[in-house]
Image (tube, helix red, strand yellow):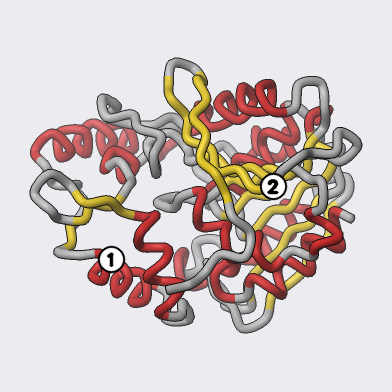
Amino acid sequence: MYKEIRSSRSEFVPIRGLSYHIQHWGGTADPALPPLVLVHGWMDVAASWQFMVDALPDAFTQGRTIIAPDWRGFGLTCTADADHYWFADYLADLDFLLDHYAPGQAVDLVGHSMGGNVAMLYAGVRPERIRKLVNLEGFGMPASQPSQAPARYAQWMDELKGLQRGDLDLKAYDDVGGVARRLMKTNPRLPADKAQWLASHWARPNASGKWEILGAPAHKITSAQLYRLDEVLEIYQRISAPVLAIEASDDSMGLWWKGKYSLDEYHERLKQVPDARVAVVQDAGHMLHHDQPKQLAGLIGDFLG
């Protein structure tokens, strides 16, 4: 199994009525250094950042606080009673989290996928809280039209009923090895030792001994709200922090959206950000922090300084 280079500890912080789980790397913090906050993507966990944290240069990590939350309904941050999730809650959770760990201080923020989308919106809503921002494949969504609203609301209500019936339950596995094989099937670049390590953080055995994924099935429900591109671009224009948008060499957009939304469209959106640049991690897919942690850590370390 993969052996961590930089050990971490777990903390639980009360945030908006939830016991929020935080992965924390580092010892005594230098108050002159901005904390580094890492926010994960959909159906992922804070521990997923371990490989990249291990690859960060010693000169960068020395004296720096590094934290990563499990978003609500993921990992060890439990919201068992929720039957759906609102995207705005992630922004508010992050706001409370920064008030706890960095009151009155701007932080360096890195977000992957869904977490990258949260980070981009938060940086435009609270620009004074972010010193520098790294967005890892947080592309946003295809633009929606008002005409889609009736069907979207109906879909949302239908899926809520499906959740009650158990239609959206996540598969359980006989052992941690089954979870590891699942991770490797989804991402063929993930080595077996890292898959085994990650599986032990991505899932837990239940009372019957089956390994359950640490993600609430309610996350699978389609949002009732449309993706309003005009609002998103207004927020992008208010980002004051320098932004590094990092992409994998594999075209995730082409795989997901089949022409409905492309990298070129995403790059056009980035032009609304006052200070944004793009970098590419070679030989990597969407989980680039697993595929090429050293290459990614080098880009992040250089950008954040």
The answer to whether residue 10 is left or right of residue 208 is right
Question: What percent of the width, then of the height, locates residue 274?
Answer: 88, 45
Indicate the amino acid at tag 1. Val
Whether residue 89 can be seen here: yes
* Residue 268: image tag: none
Residue 237 location, quadrant: top right
The answer to whether residue 285 is left or right of residue 305 is left
At 36% from the left and 62% from the top, the residue drawn is: 199
The residue carrying mark 1 is: 179
At 26% from the left and 43% from the top, the residue drawn is: 217
Question: What percent of the width, then of the height, locates residue 11?
Answer: 52, 34
The answer to whether residue 123 is left or right of residue 32 is left
Q: Secondary structure at mark 1?
A: helix
* Residue 26: image tag: 2
Indicate the amino acid at tag 2. Gly
Whether residue 253 can be seen here: no
Residue 181 vs 73, above or below: the answer is below
Question: What percent of the width, then of the height, locates residue 39?
Answer: 59, 45
Residue 294 location, quadrant: bottom right
Are there few (<14), some (14-19), or many (20+) residues within 10 Å of tag 2? some
